Image (cartoon, rainbow, N blue to C red):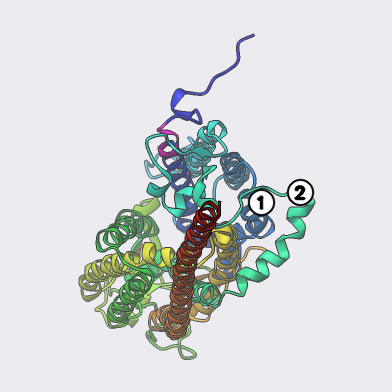
Amino acid sequence: MSHFLPPSFLLPFSPHALQMFLVALSFAYFAKALSGSYMKSTITQLERRFDIPSYLTGVIDGSFEIGNLLVIAFVSYFGAKLHRPKIIAMGCVLMAMGTFIIALPHFLIGRYKFETSIRSSVNSTNNLSPCPARLLSPAALASAGVITLLSAIPFWFLPRSLPIPSDRGPAQCTPEQTSFIKDSPLLEHKYQADEPASFLEMAKDFIPTLKTLLGNPVYFIYLCVTIIQLNSLIGMVTYKPKYIEQHYGQSASKANFLMGTINIPAVALGIFTGGLLMKRLKLSIMGAAKFAFGTSLIGYFLSLFFFVMSCENAKVAGITLVVGVSYEERSVFSACNSDCVCSDRDWDPVCGENGITYVSPCLAGCQTSTGSGKNTVFSNCSCAVAAGLSSGNLTASVGHCPHRDDCDRVFPYFLALSVITSFIISLGGTPGYMVLIRCIKPQLKSLALGFHTLSTRTLAGIPAPIYFGAIIDTTCLKWGQKRCGGRGACRIYNTTAYRIAYLGLTMGLRTVSFLLCILGFVLLKRHLRREERSAHQVANGGAELEVLRKEEVLASNSDQSLRTSTTDYNNTERETRL
């Protein structure tokens, strides 16, 4: 029976095996980012679909990281001693299964039905099609799961480790390469890569190794700084499409489209450019730290301009604007709609001719309507007369009134500044990561990276969306009501309060991280000085040993010469006597 053989470029001794590992790993990251980006883009849709507040969508978003808590630290520790490519392959399979499970409820629950006063005509082309085309987005998520599953295939055929190519000597290999290459002579004087005899011995060594890692002050401060900065970054990215939608009056689809086509490429380009600059400039550890800090600080000062790129609250009758003669201040009920039996729990906004949005056609005082679907036009809206317009057949159209022209002029500047700041901040990503790599002993690097990922996801990935959402909820002006009772999703926010809370929390966290960076620089300098002294002592010790060795050789040669001379003299004396 013939056996399945992997492609030649995946064989252990293939010169392209390392390149294929990097290609496969990059593809796996791409698949993960694809599904993760989809989850971020559904925040506002989840709020509307299930009528839930922002903090609860934050809980859903943060729960993505909970699965990492149970495995990531142990995988990073044991993965350095086991078959790493196959462990990565199993991880890709698990991610694919998770993506399929996330997409499953969209196919089981059915279409989203919402209450509206808009009439639907049977013969209207604006009716909902019987063909389930809403399934497009869940199908896209399922496709992202298939891509993740495909990314696992190459890792099953990659070797556990790579031998050093015959045309490359040990002196040409970097420490990072020797940690992946088998039987490297450079490892002999750094640490022994021999595996423990049993799994139990590896488990016993886990806690002491973790204590040694956390005892490194540079690593600990770096960990604290990145946790705080990622709190700011994750909270900001999670609710940025929502901020664009609520503050600048853009649709959810457009906000997500702009995030995907403008911001994400700017971040990717910044990370690549930062790595290229670090290689060209040949930055040291301190140089890399200063570069990362400098780019982050420049991005911080540029981000302050977001505070002045503001828009006024939308004009919504009875919520942000007092219209007509109302029974109480900022009430949706007024004299113009007192003859109607309206509910203040409905949210079916219409735009009057006066440029003011009303919570529902009933609260706008509208008596009749024509058309269907999005083309419905409401007529005889008495509240528009109360707003100061002349008498006549005043109408209202479906949806919010468009934002002001001044807000539309500010939005392109917001996008441009967002791209610039994203690019500049991302420049320091690779240099900052290299600081983490270089300040850790080689035998602790795998655990250091794993524990770093675990800590950031636990203390940033999970809580940040939750408390960002809770703070955003405090700026809500009109809450929806669920069909079964209880508070639902927010319908409209106080734009000014939203901007201050969202941007203020983001910038406040980054300010705290900069203060810790100052302490980090002090500790890093001490760390480098200790390394220089150790290297100097080793060098001096080696020189002293060489001098002693030479002196011993000279002394040995002198003794040998003396013994030879004495022997010759004795022989000569004996011959003379004879």
The first of marks 1 and 2 along the sequence is 1
In the picture, measured across the screen, residue 498 lies left or right of residue 556, that is: left
Which residue is the site of mark 1?
A: 78
Tell me where residue 209 appears, x and y as whole percent.
67, 64
Q: Secondary structure at mark 2?
A: helix
Tell me where residue 384 appears, x and y as whole percent.
33, 76
Image quadrant occupied by the N terminus: top right
The three-letter code of the residue at mark 2 reads Phe
Tell me where residue 152 appears, x and y as whole percent.
54, 37
Quadrant assignment, res 335 = bottom left
Which one is in front, 195 or 508? 195
Q: Main secondary structure of the magenta part?
A: helix
Residue 18 falls within the magenta-colored stretch: yes
Residue 319 visible to an observer of this rendering: no
Which residue is the site of mark 2?
A: 199
| Circles 1 and 2 in contact, beta carbons < 8 Å | yes
Instruction: Find the magenta span and give its range.
Output: 15-19
The three-letter code of the residue at mark 1 reads Phe
